[in-house]
Amino acid sequence: MLRAGGVAWSAHRLDAAEVAGSNPARPILIIAEKNDAAKRIALALDHSYKKLSFEGIPVYVGTWNLTKFYVVPARGHLYTLKTDVEDLRLFPVLDAEWVPLEGDRYVSKFLYIIKKLLRESEQIIIACDYDIEGETIGFNIVKYNGGFEKVVKRAKFSTLTVEELRQSFNSLLTRDKWLMADAGRTRHYIDFIWGISLSRLLMEEVRLGTGKRLSLSIGRVQGPTLIEIFNRELEINSYVPKPYWKFKIIGELRGEKFELSGPNLKSLEEVQRVKKLKGKIGKVTFFDKSIEEIKPPYPFNLSDLQKEAYRLFGIQPWESLTILEKLYLKALISYPRTSSQKLPPTINYKSILSKLAQKYKETASISRPHPVEGPMDDPAHPAIYPTGELQPLSGNEFKLYDLVVRRFIGTFYRNARVTKKYMKVKAEEFDLEADGATLIDKGWLEVYPFREIREKKIPDASVGDEVLIKDVNVELAYTKPPSRYTPSSLLDWMESNEIGTKATRADIIKTLYKRGYIKGNRIEITELGFSVARYFSFSQITTLEMTRKLESSLESIEVGKMLPGYVLSESAKILIEELKNVKRSEEMIELTKKYLAAGTGESFGKCPVCGKGELILHISQAGKRYLKCNICGASAPLPRKGKLVPAKKNCPHCGWPMIKRGGWVFCPNPNCPNSKIKNA
DNA sequence: GCAAGGTC
């Protein structure tokens, strides 16, 4: 993740008179990154603030230090980069400008209102998140709406608690330069020129080689992620399994039977010798018994929750995020886009727990005054917790809500306790061992039963005790290649390599699927993905180092050691240099043709003819699109243009899965009595 | 038909 710096603003204490300025009648305008934050800021500055609404944009009004203030929330980035080189055959694209997000009603209304407020206000305080993205959001709003020459101050806070917000507004920072915004805007530019230029190169290569206009992409985050899957695929394909033998022994001590094991066997001779242990006596050489305390799992941050939801319910990470957003909008859980594993006392656990007690009886048994917490933190939000509100839910919404509630209650629970035993036994030349575990107190597992403690009974023993070997089982096995990534473990990989952000990683994986680079829940690379990965081996765009270099340049911008223009032009130079060395790739064209012939892999539903296969989207050599069952071969032509998506319902006349194009839903079956594209 | 990053 790109780190926020902290030197672009210097501390400066304001007194009331200064805040009021020369004309106390003129209000202060506070710009927040999102509605949540705006509301909290208004509350912190004035308990009796009022919420107004102009054209549907919330504006919070109150009085602070005898001066009227407005808090207006942005909604994330309101501006984006755009190039006027619209023809996708043209690249590199080295220039772009900031424009308001198109087709977004909130943005157009916001900009209309903010212009008025900026004119009216004496002083402007930027109170977006204190990181390079937040700084970019605030900068662009002020820069492009006539506030740039006004007194602009900065509120620096890392949580939205009333205490910290008050503190930050009582020691506002004064702007000297916009270094952090410079860094943020440079990040946007560099990602844009690289991503757009190399994506266009790729599409043009494919178009010239196959005649197909596929929607393809590559970027600073997509690149290394695709390469990681590609490398994993190579490891799996080149893996040579080695045989080995594992064995289990049933021992008996004072009439109690239990299981022992030992290191895997590497030769048939060893196998023969271990089999001869049957009926012999081994001696206990070590025994230990202790009680292990297992703390409750940490409060959820977004990625921990996404991984847990995938592990338990098979819900994909991006689906989880969508569901969590719904739960958040229903006011059932806190803000889900957080990396924090901490729950500060300010969220008022007591009241939440007492509300939850109506549905969750386990709440009565909590014993910790404060929840356990993990090491990760987030500047803007605490870990995900339930608000205590109760509503009837079903399906995956219920599953995730229930998971959040149980995890939350669990963090206040006592430890689980397990008796652990460990025994070593020497039998002939073999070192055997046995593990035992007995749950003596379920602790937090009572409310959060999603973790398994494997119980295993073994007897107590003392050194020198004799163990009779009742039976020996040997099994031939093979060493396994590294396992395939799942969306969840890939998310993990991205997180530990610090590419993408908590809010974008799942989307980027989804993009790799959408582009047809990867397929399946146990992720396989497609011919297309394989060829794209190989094709871009000439470019930094596939390396993790690109992110590392970018981060370090951005830090230099933040501390004033480098100018944004310099960093950008150096980056553009490298891009141009790389493009000079691009070679035609026959391999990519061949593999792409193969991929197209095999179908895009995109399933539009179950085949109604054989009932077994999937209807896969194909694109013919001539560019015609059709569905074809991967089992029985049943096929159906499709319209040549427009984006097609499964409508997720079946035709009432013939049972074929229906398809949506824009607002039009149709049945693709050419023999359907109601088909609109009959004889197409 | 193109990035990655915010947020709804």
Image (cartoon, coloured by chain):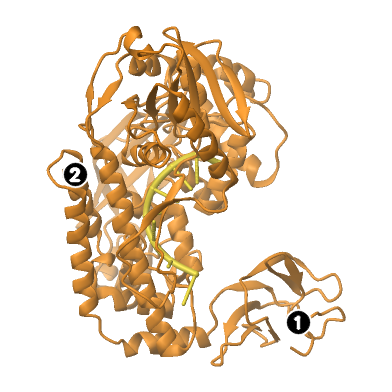
Chain colours: A orange, B yellow
Q: Residue at x 49, y 80 (%)?
A: A213
Left or right: where does residue A666 sit relative to residue A600? right
Q: Does the image show residue A356?
A: yes
Read off the chain for label 2: A
Q: Are marks 1 and 2 on the same chain?
A: yes
Q: Residue at x 51, y 67 (%)?
A: A514
Residue behind mark 1: A609
User: Which comes sooner in the sequence, label 1 or label 2?
Assistant: 2
Rendering coords of residue A40 (x, y %): 49, 22
In the drawing, does residue A258 fall left or right of residue A606? left
Letter of the chain that mark 1 sits on in the rendering: A
- Say which mark, if any, is on residue A425: none
Residue A630 picture location, percent across and down: 61, 82
Residue furthest bottom in the image: A622
- Residue A557 has which mark? 2
Residue sitting at 55 percent across and 18 percent down? A365
Would you say A494 lies left or right of A511 here?
A: left
SS of the residue under disc 2? helix
Identify which amino acid the numbered label 2 is placed on: Ile
Classify residue A124 by image quadrant.
Answer: top left
- Could you say where residue A262 lies in the image, as x and y percent from the top left? 29, 55
Residue type at numbered disc 1:
Val
Say above or below: A161 vs A669.
above
